Structure formats: C-alpha cells, structure tokens
Image (tube, rainbow, N blue to C red):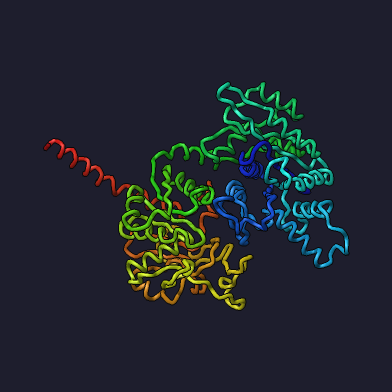
Amino acid sequence: MATKYIFVTGGVVSGIGKGITAAVLGCLLKARGIRVLNQKFDPYINIDPGLMSPTQHGEVFITDDGAETDLDIGHYERFTDTSLDCTSDITTGMIYRDILQRERDGAYNGTTVQVVPHVINEIKKHIYQPERKNQPDILIAEVGGTVGDMESLPYMEAIRQVSYEVGHENVLFIHVTLIPYLRSSGETKTKPTQHSVQKLLSLGIQPDILVCRSEQPLTDDTRRKIALYCNVDMDCVIQNIDVETVYHLPLALEAQNLAQTVCQKLNLPKAAERAADLDAWHSLTQRDRLATEPLRIGLVGKYLALHDAYLSVLESLRHAGITNGVKVDLKWVDAEELVDAKSAAAQLDDVSAILVPGGFGPRGMDGMIEAASYAIRSNKPYFGIGLGMQMAVAAFARSRAGLADAHSAEAEKPCTPLFVLPQPDANSDPCQSAILNTIQKPMRRGAYPCRIVPGTHLAEAYQQHEVLERHHHRWEFNMDYQELLCQAGLKLSGLSPDGRLVEAFEIENHPWFLGVLFHPEFKSRPIRPHPLFTAFLSAAQAWAARQLPLTAASQMEDKHHGHDL
C-alpha cells in the first residue's frame, strides 16, 4: 500500500514527551504487523548535533551509518527495535545547506530562492523520499520545538501541504500537549491546550488526536471539555499520565486504544481489528516491578549538568537491571573531583562497580584515570566506554607497565601517547578510512566489525566470534605500545578483523575489568538488553555478594566490642 503519514507536534511547553509518544506509537503499530518508520525534524540551524554541547542538547545518538543524530532517534530505535539511519533526523541546517549548494551549482536557473516554495519543497522531499528502498506502511514524523515557534513554521506549512497532496485520509495529526495541575486548588487546566490547538488551527492544521500530558488522571468532564473546544472526538483525547518508567507507557497507551484509533482514522480496518503482540512488553513490565534489589553503580563522567548527555548509557543500565533482577542505584561522580587516589577512594568506596562513559576533550581525563586506577587496586568491576576505555588503558600503563606519564594525545600535554589520531588512508582497510567532520579531524563513526578473542570476558558476554558495534571517536590505540602493555598483563580481547585496531581490552587476574572503544549503549533495547551491560551488572552483583559476609562479620565484631565495653 501507499505510505500513510502521522505528524507529531507539541504545544504549550517543550520536553513533554513528543519523542517518546512517537516512539511508543511506532512500537504499538509495529505490534500490529504494520511496517513503521520514525523520523524527526529539528528546527535548529546546526547541521547536526555532533558539535553541540552535551550539557545543552544531550547525547549525540549514533546510527549504524555513522550519522550524528538527536537523542530522540535513540527512543525510536529502542521502542521499535529498528535500526535507523541518517534520513531519520533532518535539521534546518541540512535543509539550507542543500538548498544553498544547489543554488551555487546553478540548479535553480537564476530563480529567486525563497522559503516558499523552495524550503517547503525541500522539507517535503525528506518526508516523501521516493528513493527510499523500503517504503513504510506508515511514516511517523515528529516536528521538534513547540507550536508557535518561529523556526518551526516552515515545517508546519510543509506537513499541511502533505495532507493536501496525499489526501487527509492518508494523514494523521497528533498533538502532544500539557494539562497543568494546580495543587493549591486541585484543578487541571485545559486553557493552555485550547490555545495551543488554536495556534495549530491558524496554521491550517486540525489535530486528529490529542495526547495530554498530565500528572493527574483526566476526568471524563475534562476530556469532554477538551474535545469540545479542540474539535476532536472524546475518544481521541488520550491521557499520558506519569508511569513507573517509560517502558510501561506502551501498555498504558494501548489500554486507551491509541494505536487502534490511529488505524481506524487512517482507514486500516484489518490492523485496527488485529490484536497487538505485546507479550514481550507485558513480560518486561512484570520483571521491572520485581527488580527491586538495589545495586549501587558509580558513573564517573564530566557532563553531569545534564544527565541526558548519557541517556543511552542510563537506559542500557536500566535494560540490564530489569534482566538481572536489580534496581540500579546510580551514583553520579564528577570526574573533575577525583584529584588523587584518596578522593577516588572516598567517592567510589560505596559502589559495587564503576562505569566511565565516553566524551571528548581533556577536561576530566585525569579524574577518569583515578577512577580506573581505583578499580584496579580494589578489584572492583570496571566498564570503560570510549574515553572511559582510553583512560583505563592509561591507568593500567601507569600502575602496571611503569609508564608514569601514560595518557592520550587528546590530553594536549606532554605524555607517552597511548592513543593517537590515525593517518587517513583511503587505500587501507575501511576501518582506517577517516570520516572528516567540520573541524577536519578524523573520526570513526558508525558500525564496524570487532573480532572477539576466545576465553575473554568479552567472548563470555557476546557468545559470538564477531560483532558489529557503533563507534564515535577520533583516537585509536597506539600499537607501538602493544607488546609492552601485554607483557604487563593487558589482554586485547577485541580487534578489527585485520588486527590493526584495538576495539576492547581486559586486565589479566582482575575479576571483571573491560574497556571498549565502541559504544554498545546505542544498540541496547529494553526487550533485548546489550550483553555487555548485563555482564557488567552480573559482575557488580557478584562483587556485592562477596562483600555481604564481610559486612556481617564486621557488624558482629562491632557488637562484640560493644559488649566488651
């Protein structure tokens, strides 16, 4: 069948869950056998979020093809269990870049280039994408920002035109809005939603479904009022109240027949009647409720001002926690506060394992080295990702190989450079080919193969000989130091197929110490958690279990001492 379109907009305030709503809807439609594709339009002028501050924008989510995308793309992948690509995240910067390049190339034959029609047409081109190999049954496109924002106006006009061009029977508009709750009076207020819908109407868009974000359940009277003044059916006023975790939301929205209503309005009667296969989500939510045993994990990072900077890592820990039957109690540790061995021990003594995620730039590097050094001394489980892997190698080299100044060249100070920028070579193995970003530094982005060395923690976790994992880094392990470090007890457990690039390492005679240069968090799914995160939490559980007898003995000793006094 021809592709049908769902456009998700947001009103009143930002951050009310447009991305989650679009992702969950994709999940529910897929559960009915519908081929779904999610897409986002971001109104900012940056080409992509790759050079944006993590503390302002959150994490950069990497796809298999190496695209640096918005974190909502991660939500789409996790809920629909689908790998997306660069065509799923379009920015105003991309739109204008392509238009201006064509103008410079003379493609417009001297025509005056304007927002209408040229920018609008470019947006529609990204919606339709006739060159797409596998056209979905339904495209779910989220428009970033809030209705009324100046920068969003071209996207609103574009989706209005799409509805006109393909017929409204093939288009659905879902508006995510806020219903504030005033605790002082115990009232929910619908006026902000009414005003938001009026703004949409002024742009030529009538929403078909309203998803109302509220911390309190909506009464029938409230829903009836919203329906009346916003020109929608009452059963199309969907309440999205707080749930235990976002992974309970598919069942919550399914209980309100969101996907069934969508199918009916898009004239998909067979899909509307088909029972959704949500067994995996029922199992997930049940296990989530049973996962109550606390497990304290220390996350040592440098973007703590905005926890969304590590969103995929947090979600991966949550996925693994549900599988392992534990509730991860995360302790946030600022890497810059770990100035020496004493401060590292003070901050990390009460955790059962340490995770150091990725990042760029020299800030906080020395603190990450202190965290890894503490894990080596204490035999606590350690999981280093990206920069966390690099700093762990430096910590090992300093403590076990006699390289007191071991560091990454990225530290921008005199050192023994264990990680260096590779030399681009178009004729070499693809893993050595540089992808140049706008600041002209080589970067390995997207999915690359990793050959796993048997008999390692990596092999035990994956149960495979080779895996494909996503990368997002510039600096590579300096093979000049391979022999020295391996003689000291470093074990290279993951390599590129040609053996020229180090993908993962471990430390011999350590219960569980793993560093990976790739980013496994981008491939973890709630119903299919990443094996490295489940293995990491298993190691943390084992550590915690070993401490229980010691704790009990210590308490008994304190009790005896008290009696003696």
The answer to whether residue 265 is above or below residue 111 is above
Residue 5 is drawn in which quadrant?
top right
The residue lying toward the viewer, choosing from 4 and 175, is 175
Residue 565 is drawn in which quadrant?
top left
Counting from the top left corner in percent of width and height, residue 69 is at 62, 55
Residue beneath the point at 33% across and 71% down: 402
Counting from the top left corner in percent of width and height, residue 238 is at 66, 32
- The residue positioned farthest toward the left in the image shown: 564
Q: Is residue 189 visible?
A: yes
Counting from the top left corner in percent of width and height, residue 258 is at 66, 35
Residue beneath the point at 35% across and 70% down: 404
Left or right, 127 with respect to 362, comes to right
The residue lying toward the viewer, choosing from 170 and 392, is 392
The image shows a total of numbered marks equal to 0
- The residue positioned farthest toward the bottom in the image shown: 427
The answer to whether residue 13 is above or below residue 44 is above
Left or right, 451 with respect to 140, comes to left
Residue 437 is drawn in which quadrant?
bottom right
Residue beneath the point at 63% across and 59% down: 67
Q: Is residue 63 visible?
A: no
Residue beneath the point at 49% across and 71% down: 420
The answer to whether residue 384 is above or below residue 430 is above
Counting from the top left corner in percent of width and height, residue 375 is at 35, 57
